[in-house]
Image: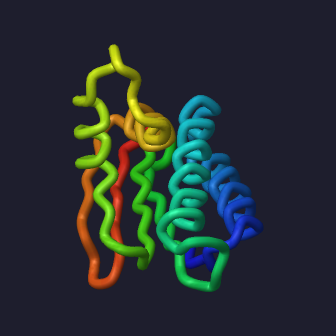
Amino acid sequence: MNLPARLPSVMHALETISQFARLRNIGGATLARLNVAVEELATNTIKYGYGGECDRPIRIALAAPRDADMVELTYEDEAAPFDPLDWHARWQARPIAGGREPGGRGIALVVGLSRGAAYSPLAPGNRLRLRIG
């Protein structure tokens, strides 16, 4: 999928992901994790990466063998470089006793929903690959 960075496009992406899941016999729990990850990534790109809704791209690719309950999600944007895995590691290392600064829970959620993750910078932008299942 190649979508403009707009909230209605995110809804369209979630509908397309549901169709993909039905065709591939992806279970409901995996589909729910996938939807949460895509919604969180896309809204973060729109809000923080692009500074608001715009026509800049969000690209989403899914891969899964038939009848397997594992999906590989590739998510790309053309926002400024941002490695959510590095950010998450630094966020987790902060002491809890004094309270962590607000934010970061969405990234923690996305990372926690995945069984594997890899980040690559693009020129321009970012690529995040997640294994969800």
Locate residue 16: give its quadrant.
bottom right
Q: Position of residue 27 (x, y in %)?
A: 59, 33
Q: Position of residue 70 (x, y in %)?
A: 43, 40
Question: Number of numbered discs present?
Answer: 0
Q: Residue at x 28, y 77 (%)?
A: 122
**One can see residue 62 in this view:** yes
Q: Position of residue 63 (x, y in %)?
A: 43, 57
Q: Is residue 69 above or below residue 61?
A: above
The front one of 50 and 72 is 50
Q: Residue at x 38, y 39 (%)?
A: 111
**One can see residue 69 in this view:** no
Q: Is residue 110 above or below residue 50?
A: above
The front one of 119 and 54 is 54
**Which quarter of the figure is the N terminus placed in?**
bottom right
The front one of 35 and 80 is 80
Looking at this view, name the residue that lies furthest to the top.
97
Q: Residue at x 44, y 41 (%)?
A: 104
Q: Is residue 123 above or below residue 35?
A: below
Judge left or right: residue 94 versus residue 98.
left
